[in-house]
């Protein structure tokens, strides 16, 4: 069957067709659509074998649940944005040590250029760190095909496989040919080796030795599996190593017309193919890769030092940001980026149009109240978090002084309060609170830290499009159970008509010298509109 | 045959529906397609753009190289100007003339129009007036704009119309008909004013 699919959707369909039993994920751009696609497919096809597809509370719980599913012999997919890999790193790295029973594929969607993220970390490092194979498709068809291959490889080698995509791959559509029907799911089977999943040092040492012993096989499969290809050019002195979607830009630009091209979509590096490129007389090698210079650094350990290697480290390609076809000059090795033909004709300077919180959004009323109260104090500091409300850093609110990673608002406010900062206020969304804020609040409560935690509860995971939020209906009980006194767990409705009440509540809790929580609860305007249309 | 199209607008205006309809039409013609779009943070009232490429031959890059777009198709006049570096020397700007003013620094609209009018091939279309004329809601402005671009697309109007039907069929027959009227009105306008 032929479909127009996003890269994310191609991965999702590939996983379904590979005989998936469960997808575990926390929403995060640009990975969210993978899980959403599977959820939609499930709601449409209730006669087929069920696939577990409910959102997880965070990437770590997702990764661990997936490991449990593979323990029971079935195929599991874990999806996240690149920084989600940091959250689940403990489970991820150790899943390589336990190995898997059913197939386990982890999708990391990187966001070079930080379209919707706080850094540009490259998840290929994680595959190398965990010593497992990694796939990096160059187009949507490959995304579909490689997802199935990743499951096969995982079951063949008994290790998890990382599938790495970047924003342009995740969020670009193209035609994809898919199978007519999915492969059957695995039957439940328990691991034959009963010690495999017990990482006591004695067993872990044995498992680690097993994992190391598999490394040459991983390299051999990269060389002979057919996903990495070497094409000798008429000019063999120059060669391009093109990884993932960078291959498309190289092809589009025309710089590959005469030179040799090594296309890489499977890691670890295919050493034999690189050696072939060298044997053919390569004197200058351009490494084109989306993200950080992972291959550019690694390839230096494989090929002789007299061969000139250029790429993102040497400045031949931009050191940061995502690549585009414009990064590759027609005449050679990307020394001079092409310049636009019509830029000078824009005739006027254009004002930017930054994203902003929606009109009618409850976060706006929350910030209006918070800002007015904060101004009553000398040097109030507001520690923000990850979500739509991060936009409170921009005009007109200029409300927050920090935003680092999921959950950091609460614990940074605590640390600052420990250092004597007063008032120390955290602003965190409901979904981010259950993702990574609860443990921090427990730290606060255990020492009665002088912080106010303002949970801006819009009853959804708003920034990524309105997915279910894990703590909906439970937030007050969670805060109290973590040790915040009942009289200091306050709830307000962020509306203009309630402004004086909201300000009074926030002021009272700032004046209380201990841990307190103010929940500002009103449904996300976007999810509300969507429900009204139904 | 190959068309590179930059779709532009402000988050929430409906540029992705335009892309979906063109995509369905290209699929019906047996063409190749690639369409890069923006999700996530920048959708919240910010500038959004999509690179849409359709071709009878396989397409490599998901992104259009600068200086190569055949059409800039924009639901907002200021946003049309943001992507000029991508426009080919003989490329065409098709844009709604209706400004979306959610920023304080929005320039004088006449200055925006004059900048667009310096391009020999351009269509400035009052999508709000046209949706009213054909008794369609303002949400159908995107189909008016798409209609206006049909002469430049290299796809027959009937094919685009059946693509539209496919995309909107899951909603309701009324919505299909409303959008077809909008598409037709846009096409008529462009045919008269190009």
Image: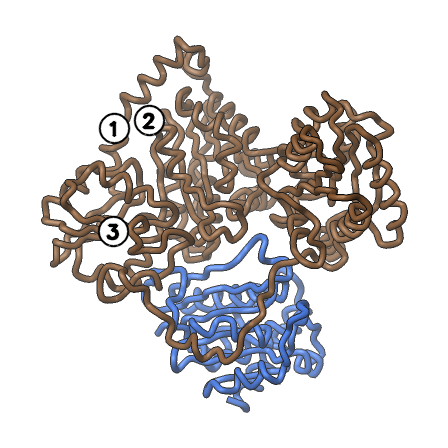
Chain colours: A brown, B blue
Q: Which residue is mark 3?
A: A310
Mark 1 chain: A
**Does A16 sit above or below residue A215?**
below
Q: In which quadrant of the rendered image does the C terminus of chain A lie?
A: bottom right
Say which mark, if any, is on residue A38. Answer: none
N-term-proximal mark, 1 vs 2:
2
Q: Nearer the viewer, mark 3 or mark 2?
A: 3
Mark 2 chain: A
N-term-proximal mark, 3 vs 1:
1
**Residue neighbourhood size for the residue with mark 2, other residues' Cα within 10 Å, grouped as few (<14), some (14–19), many (≥20):** some
Res A504 → quadrant = top right
Q: CA distance from mark 1 to mark 2?
A: 9 Å
Q: Are marks 1 and 2 in contact (CB under 8 Å)?
A: yes
Residue A53, position as x, y percentages in the image: 57, 36
Mark 3 chain: A
- Locate residue A105 relative to residue A532 in the image: left or right: left
Q: Secondary structure at mark 3?
A: strand
Q: Secondary structure at mark 1?
A: helix
Residues behind callouts 3 and 2 on a single chain:
yes
Q: Nearer the viewer, mark 1 or mark 2?
A: 1
**Residue neighbourhood size for the residue with mark 3, other residues' Cα within 10 Å, grouped as few (<14), some (14–19), many (≥20):** many
Nearer to us in this view, A203 or A350: A350
Q: Which residue is mark 2?
A: A157
Q: Secondary structure at mark 2?
A: helix
Nearer to us in this view, A490 or B166: A490
Image label count: 3
**Residue neighbourhood size for the residue with mark 1, other residues' Cα within 10 Å, grouped as few (<14), some (14–19), many (≥20):** few
Nearer to us in this view, B51 or B33: B51
Say which mark, if any, is on residue A217. Answer: 1
């Amino acid at each position: 069957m032929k479909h127009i699919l996003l890269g994310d959707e191609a991965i999702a369909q590939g996983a379904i067709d590979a005989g998936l039993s469960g997808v575990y994920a926390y929403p995060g751009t640009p990975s969210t659509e993978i899980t959403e696609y599977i959820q939609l497919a499930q709601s449409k096809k209730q006669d087929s074998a069920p696939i577990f597809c409910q959102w997880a509370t965070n990437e770590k719980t997702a990764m661990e649940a997936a490991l449990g599913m593979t323990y029971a012999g079935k195929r599991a997919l874990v999806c996240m944005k690149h920084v989600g890999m940091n959250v689940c790193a403990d489970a991820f790295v150790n899943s390589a040590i336990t190995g898997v029973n059913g197939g386990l594929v982890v999708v990391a969607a990187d966001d070079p250029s930080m379209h919707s993220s706080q850094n540009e970390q490259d998840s290929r490092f994680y595959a190398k760190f965990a010593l497992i194979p990694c796939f990096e498709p160059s187009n949507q068809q490959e995304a579909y095909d490689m997802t199935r291959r990743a499951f096969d490889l995982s079951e063949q080698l008994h290790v998890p496989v990382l599938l790495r995509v970047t924003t342009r791959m995740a969020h670009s559509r193209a035609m994809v040919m898919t199978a007519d029907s999915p492969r059957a799911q695995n039957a439940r089977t328990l691991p034959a080796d009963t010690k495999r999943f017990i990482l006591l040092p004695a067993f872990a040492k044995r498992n680690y030795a097993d994992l190391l012993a598999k490394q040459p096989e991983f390299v051999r499969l990269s060389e002979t599996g057919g996903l990495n290809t070497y094409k000798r050019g008429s000019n063999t002195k120059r060669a391009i190593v093109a990884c993932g979607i960078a291959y498309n830009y190289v092809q589009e630009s025309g710089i590959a017309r005469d030179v040799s091209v090594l296309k890489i979509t499977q890691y670890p590096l295919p050493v034999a193919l690189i050696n072939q490129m060298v044997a053919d007389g390569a004197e200058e090698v351009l490494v084109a890769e989306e993200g950080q210079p992972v291959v550019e650094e690694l390839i230096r350990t494989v090929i002789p030092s007299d061969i000139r290697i250029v790429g993102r480290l040497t400045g031949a390609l931009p050191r940061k940001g995502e690549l585009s076809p414009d990064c590759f000059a027609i005449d050679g090795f990307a020394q001079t980026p092409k310049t636009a033909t019509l830029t000078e004709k824009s005739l006027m300077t254009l004002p930017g149009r930054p994203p902003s919180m929606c009109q009618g959004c409850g976060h706006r009323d929350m910030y209006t109240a918070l800002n007015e109260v904060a101004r009553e104090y000398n040097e109030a500091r507001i520690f923000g978090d990850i979500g739509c409300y991060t936009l409170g850093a921009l005009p007109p609110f200029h409300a927050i002084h920090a935003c680092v990673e999921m959950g950091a608002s609460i614990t940074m406010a605590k640390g600052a309060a420990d250092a004597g900062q007063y008032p120390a206020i955290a602003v965190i969304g409901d979904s981010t609170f259950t993702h990574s804020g609860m443990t921090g609040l427990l730290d606060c409560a255990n020492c009665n830290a002088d912080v106010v935690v303002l949970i801006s509860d819009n009853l959804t995971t708003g920034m990524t499009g309105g997915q279910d939020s894990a703590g909906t209906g439970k937030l007050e009980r969670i805060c109290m159970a973590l040790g915040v006194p009942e009289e200091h767990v306050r709830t307000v409705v962020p509306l203009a008509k309630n402004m004086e009440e909201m300000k009074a509540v926030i002021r009272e809790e700032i004046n209380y010298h201990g841990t307190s929580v103010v929940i500002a609860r009103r449904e996300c305007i976007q999810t509300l509109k969507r429900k009204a249309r139904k | 045959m190959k068309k590179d199209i930059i779709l532009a607008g402000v988050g929430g205006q409906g540029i992705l529906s335009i892309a979906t309809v063109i995509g369905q039409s290209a699929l019906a013609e047996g063409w190749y397609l690639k369409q890069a779009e923006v999700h996530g943070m920048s959708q919240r009232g910010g500038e959004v753009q999509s690179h849409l490429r359709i071709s009878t031959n396989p397409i490599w890059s998901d992104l259009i190289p600068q200086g190569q777009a055949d059409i800039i198709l924009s639901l907002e006049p200021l946003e049309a100007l943001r992507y000029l570096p991508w426009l080919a020397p003989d490329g065409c700007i098709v844009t709604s003339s209706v400004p979306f003013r959610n920023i304080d620094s929005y320039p004088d609209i006449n200055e925006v129009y004059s900048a667009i009018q310096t391009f020999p091939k351009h269509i400035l279309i009052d999508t709000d007036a046209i949706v009213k004329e054909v008794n369609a809601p303002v949400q159908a402005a995107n189909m008016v704009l798409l209609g206006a671009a049909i002469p430049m697309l290299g796809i027959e109007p009937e094919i685009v119309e059946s693509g539209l039907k496919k995309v909107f069929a899951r909603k309701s027959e009324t919505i299909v008909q409303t959008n077809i009227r909008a598409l037709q009105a846009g096409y008529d306008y462009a045919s008269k004013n190009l």
